């Protein structure tokens, strides 16, 4: 994976590291399958960014590949043909001489499924089924039904419209796993520069600032789940797909390599954060100078913790450099009490949650301790407000680590280790 919100540079970095195109020949037929769910202007966080697809086209051309098709079928009520024009895929096709295919207009082949589930057979785009090389280019984002979507769920776009709607009237998660057994991409590149916080249809894009690639859809989707704040086993279609493959998801560990240094080492990426939405979360948030991925991870973690009602009124979250005492964005009980959200009264007795190495380091320095104290790091100590201090190390800590740490802290008698949770 690469920390970046750009397109061309991280795609090149990932392709050069993994060399997915080395076996391709000039006559190879290659299909690029982005996620083009929306054919409206407000598609950021929902659709694969066209510049990511273009970067792949350029690299394929550098490998001499001539036959390239960009193919997808949009979501219900949307049109890939219209989306190609709105999102800029038409220009890419014209610039590079590649073909655009609205899969809903393609022919389909019927293939028997391999494992038990709602379907005995599935119809798949003929172009996808017959190509020499399939590149899956999903978005890392939340999904209102399956909780998250990435490479496995993105495959739904290769089917005819009636079958796509049929998926939603049945055991959707198992059906996704059945489809994923039939359509195995040769390479996956997941666009996580902007992922939607709550829905596959966009509206709440968050600057996650990551891109991940690999050959195994399960590995990429496990990374995506953790990036969005989920334990992979919470995602039913991942668990089902792992079972089909005879794998035990809780013990499945992707071989994850970071190809650049974490956002923390890149001062150019450091930016003041956008407000999180002061009244959405039941906590105060003190934001210093924070990296975009760190802040996005916190945002996804807070969303998950809010869904599970695991934030405690009175909690104060501190993130970024020099966050202590910074302007709070939200405060506990602000919305419930009808407060303004700018009231920064200390939350007596609440936890102080330090997210990331920056506030943890500052907190320890302030306490006269430059070295990590494992006992304190594990259990937290008293805060200036009289409540516990919870230190969540990492640069940046992932969203699932933040969630797991706060879950285990809330119920110390269960004190699950992060590995157990995963
Ligand atoms: S802890 Fe977070 S804010 Fe601090 S340098 Fe690391 S990623 Fe950036």
Image (cartoon, rainbow, N blue to C red):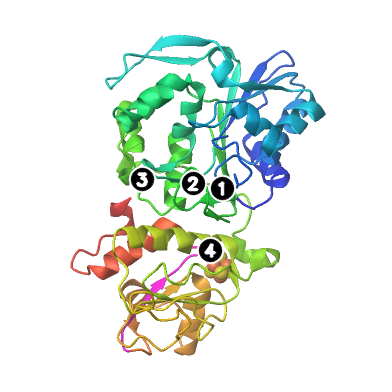
Q: Earlier in the sequence, mark 4 or mark 2?
A: 2
Q: Residue at x 39, y 88 (%)?
A: 346
Q: Earlier in the sequence, mark 1 or mark 2?
A: 1
User: Which quadrant would residue 378 be assigned to in this image?
Assistant: bottom left
Q: Residue at x 47, y 62 (%)?
A: 299
User: Which quadrant would residue 369 be assigned to in this image?
Assistant: bottom left
- Give yes or no for contact between labels 2 and 3 (Cβ–Cβ under 8 Å): no
- Give yes or no for contact between labels 1 and 2 (Cβ–Cβ under 8 Å): yes
Q: Which residue is mark 4?
A: 294
Quarter for ligand 1?
A: bottom right
**Label 4 crowding class (10 Å Cα cut-off): few <14, some 14-19, many 20+?**
many
On screen, 79 above or below 310? Answer: above
Return the residue nearer the eye: 49 or 324.
Answer: 49
Disc number for residue 141: 2
Q: Which residue is mark 3?
A: 232
**Label 3 crowding class (10 Å Cα cut-off): few <14, some 14-19, many 20+?**
many
Question: Looking at this rendering, what residue extends furthest in the right direction?
Answer: 95
Secondary-structure class at tag 1: loop
Spatial separation of the CA atoms under disc 1 and disc 3 = 21 Å
Report whether the residue tagged 4 is closer than 8 Å to ligand 1: yes
């Amino acid at each position: 994976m690469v920390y970046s919100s750009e397109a061309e540079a991280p795609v090149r970095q990932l392709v050069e590291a993994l060399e997915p195109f080395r076996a391709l020949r000039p006559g190879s037929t290659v299909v690029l399958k982005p996620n083009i769910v929306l054919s409206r202007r407000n598609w950021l966080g929902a659709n694969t960014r066209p510049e990511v697809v273009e970067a792949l086209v350029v690299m394929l051309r550098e490998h001499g590949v001539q036959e390239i098709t960009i193919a997808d079928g949009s979501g219900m009520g949307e049109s890939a043909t219209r989306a190609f024009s709105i999102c800029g895929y038409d220009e890419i096709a014209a610039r590079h001489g590649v073909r655009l295919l609205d899969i809903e207009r393609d022919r389909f082949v019927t293939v028997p499924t391999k494992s038990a589930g709602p379907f005995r057979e599935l119809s798949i785009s003929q172009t996808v089924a017959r190509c020499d090389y399939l590149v899956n280019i999903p978005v890392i984002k939340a999904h209102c039904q399956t909780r998250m979507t990435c490479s496995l769920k993105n495959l739904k776009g290769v089917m005819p419209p009636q079958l796509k709607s049929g998926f939603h009237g049945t055991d959707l998660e198992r059906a996704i796993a059945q489809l994923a057994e039939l359509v195995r991409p040769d390479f996956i590149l997941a666009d996580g520069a902007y992922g939607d916080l709550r829905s596959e249809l966009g509206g709440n894009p968050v600057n996650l600032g990551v891109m991940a690639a690999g050959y195994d859809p399960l590995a990429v989707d496990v990374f995506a789940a953790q990036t969005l704040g989920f334990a992979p086993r919470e995602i039913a279609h991942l668990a089902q797909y792992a079972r089909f493959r005879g794998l035990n998801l809780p013990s499945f560990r992707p071989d994850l390599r970071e190809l650049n240094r974490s956002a923390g080492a890149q001062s150019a990426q450091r930016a003041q954060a956008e407000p999180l939405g002061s009244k959405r979360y039941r906590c105060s948030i003190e934001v210093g100078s924070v990296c975009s991925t760190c802040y996005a991870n916190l945002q996804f973690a807070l969303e998950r913790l809010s869904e599970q009602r695991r934030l405690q009124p009175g909690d104060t979250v501190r993130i970024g450099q020099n966050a202590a005492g910074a302007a709070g964005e939200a405060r506990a009980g602000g919305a419930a009490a009808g407060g303004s959200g700018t009231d920064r009264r200390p939350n007596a007795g609440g936890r102080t949650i330090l997210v990331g190495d920056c506030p943890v380091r500052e907190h320890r320095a302030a306490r006269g301790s430059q070295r990590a104290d494992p006992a304190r790091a594990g259990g937290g100590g008293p805060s200036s407000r009289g409540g516990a201090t919870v230190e969540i190390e990492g640069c940046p800590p992932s969203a699932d680590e933040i969630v797991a740490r706060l879950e285990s802290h809330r119920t110390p008698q269960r004190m699950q280790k992060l590995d157990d949770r995963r």
